[in-house]
Amino acid sequence: MKKVLSILLLSFLMIGCKTTANKETAGTDSTSSTEEDLKYYFKGTGNEPFWGIKMGNDEIVFTSLIPGKEKITFPAVDAIKAMDANVKMYKVSNETTSATITIQQLDCQDSMSGAISPYSVKVEIKNNSELEAKKLSGCGKYLTDYRLHDIWVLEELNGYKVFATDFQKEMPRIEINSTENRFSGYGGCNAISGSIFYEKDLLRFTKVISTLMACPQGNKEGEFTKALQSTTTYSIGNNQLTLSNPSGKLLVFKKVD
């Protein structure tokens, strides 16, 4: 009898471990980043009825539990931007359906989970045969480019190659956490950290703070941090991260493992 009980107990433990492992694997898969993430730059969801929207450079995909509107794909269009607020409107249509999508930078609380998102989303959607549009509200966020998630060491500053002699001890570097939209690193004299603000075609380094160590004359940390905070756009290629603004190229970093 004791032997049978021991076998049963061992079986339960093995099943429990397997279930836990499967959950952990599923969790990892759901949060991992792939090149598919680059297809869409914004995602929004809402409840009652459940609906979702994915905004991409090539297409906009609306899904829902609304009969006749389970999945609708629209061609991508340029945003109509408000002059006095961070509000973007997209008017989209295809052969059967039209919609107006409004994205506003405004804290939004999910009505079921209670989670806070940085943007509110409103969708008005109707099939061509309908007289009135269905009005939906929800929350959303921009999907920060996962390729930024790495450690980057400075190579160029304001168009010129940099050398170790330009800084206190070593080359400036930044480590970007694209999941939390934060960065940290070394400015060439002091430790630095801050937040990143990401939207489609927009990248800013904000709330930058640093330690207060006095830097020797000739140290270019000030130029580096000023250029970092002046950034508005970026490009990634050949293991390099290039930060720019409308005036031109500001910083070039090399990816390090």
Image (cartoon, helix red, strand yellow):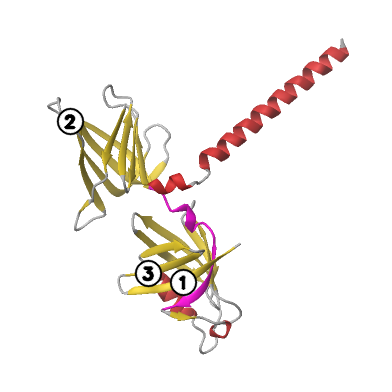
Task: Find residue 10 and report its image quarter.
Answer: top right
Crowd rating for badge 1 (residues with CA inside 10 Å; few <14, some 14–19, many 20+) = many
* Total marks in image: 3
Q: Which residues are magenta?
A: 142-158
Q: Name the one closer to the observer, 129 or 209.
A: 129
Q: Is residue 157 magenta?
A: yes
Quickly name the residue at label 2: 133
Task: Find residue 94 and report its image quarter.
Answer: top left
List x then y, in percent, for residue 235.
Answer: 41, 63
Which label's residue is closer to the chain start, 2 or 1? 2
Quickly name the residue at label 3: 244
Q: Name the one closer to the observer, 86 or 106.
A: 86
Amino acid found under the numbered disc labelled 2: Ala
Q: From this viewpoint, which residue is outermost toward the bottom?
A: 217
Amino acid found under the numbered disc labelled 3: Ser
List x then y, in percent, for residue 193.
Answer: 51, 65
| Residue 86 against residue 27 in the figure, above or below | below
Element assignment for label 3: strand
Quickly name the residue at label 1: 252
Crowd rating for badge 2 (residues with CA inside 10 Å; few <14, some 14–19, many 20+) = some
Element assignment for label 2: loop
Task: Find residue 189 and report its image quarter.
Answer: bottom right
Which label's residue is closer to the chain start, 3 or 2? 2
Q: Nearer the viewer, mark 2 or mark 1?
A: 1
Q: Is 55 displayed left or right of 16 in the figure?
A: left
Whether the residues at callouts 1 and 3 have beta carbons within 8 Å, the answer is no
List x then y, in percent, for residue 36.
Answer: 44, 44
Q: Is residue 146 magenta?
A: yes
Whether the residues at callouts 2 and 1 have beta carbons within 8 Å, the answer is no
Amino acid found under the numbered disc labelled 1: Val
Q: From this viewpoint, which residue is outermost toward the top?
A: 1
